[in-house]
Image (cartoon, rainbow, N blue to C red):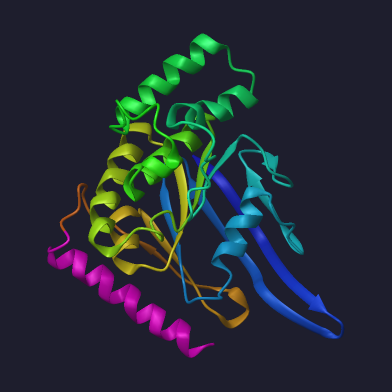
Amino acid sequence: MIKLKVEHLGKTFSRGDDTRVVLGDISFEVEDRQFVSILGPSGCGKTTLLSILAGFQDATSGNILLGNRKVSRPGPDRGFVFQNYALFPWMTVKENVMFPMKQQNVPREERERTAARLLNMAQLDGKENFFPKELSGGMKQRTAFIRALAGRPEILLMDEPMGAVDFQMRQKLQEELESLWLKEQITVIMVTHDVDEAVYLSDRVIVLSSKQGRILDDVFIDLPRPRDREAEAYEKHKTRLNSLLRKAFKEI
């Protein structure tokens, strides 16, 4: 079942007589419950693409269909996890998680049940009354993830969700994120610049070129989960994606 369709999407920025093509005629489909990563050089339009999918920016051309509905503005059908978590500092962990449900007028009792389930799933029991400043980077990341899930979105969009975490914590958080995703089985599109992260988490990796933001390749990661980072097949996927990235850089 196709969950998301991106049809001939284009984005240009103009300043005076100068026009810059950021995304040029991008088309792809995402199946229900797939985990898809967008990978490419810095400045290739990854975050712009994700922002358009979220409805935060308008496309210059093309269409985005979520199910049979055209995407033109932000909505609760799309959850978003920012690189810097974007947690409300004046709210506790539990209040942050309950916020999207409150915005949707979900009854209090149901909000409490859902928050308790998600906090337990993310191993944040006992931390529900902490404020963001009292949390580690990993706890903030998990809080941001389950807050996005609390709104019951049809698709989850993530912009380098582990970009603010140090290298030592990164692999552990990738494993935790995979575990949470497998439990929820939600469709995910994630922007990343990390090849290992893309191979570990994704069913597919769409590689963007810097040249007019086109799709350079669409790579299927056909590996069993949980994934063995030391397996030969895992290394082959990393090698292929690194080769594609080098090709993408040459087109800058």
Q: Is residue 28 left or right of residue 10?
A: left
Q: Residue 214 appears at what percent x and percent y?
A: 58, 74
In the rendered image, residue 185 lying in the magenta stretch gets the answer no
* Residue furthest to the bottom: 250
Residue at image position (33%, 46%) is 136
Residue beneath the point at 52% across and 32% down: 91
**Which contiguous range is marked in magenta?**
229-252
Q: Quadrant of the C terminus?
A: bottom right
In the displayed structure, does residue 54 sit left or right of residue 216? right
Q: Nearer the viewer, residue 160 or 242?
A: 160
**Looking at the picture, does residue 22 appear above or below residue 162?**
below
Q: Main secondary structure of the magenta part?
A: helix
Q: Position of residue 76 (x, y in %)?
A: 62, 34
Q: Is residue 238 magenta?
A: yes
Q: Who is closer to the viewer here, 62 or 133?
A: 133
Q: Position of residue 32 (x, y in %)?
A: 46, 40
- Among all residues in the image, which is located at the extreme right? 16
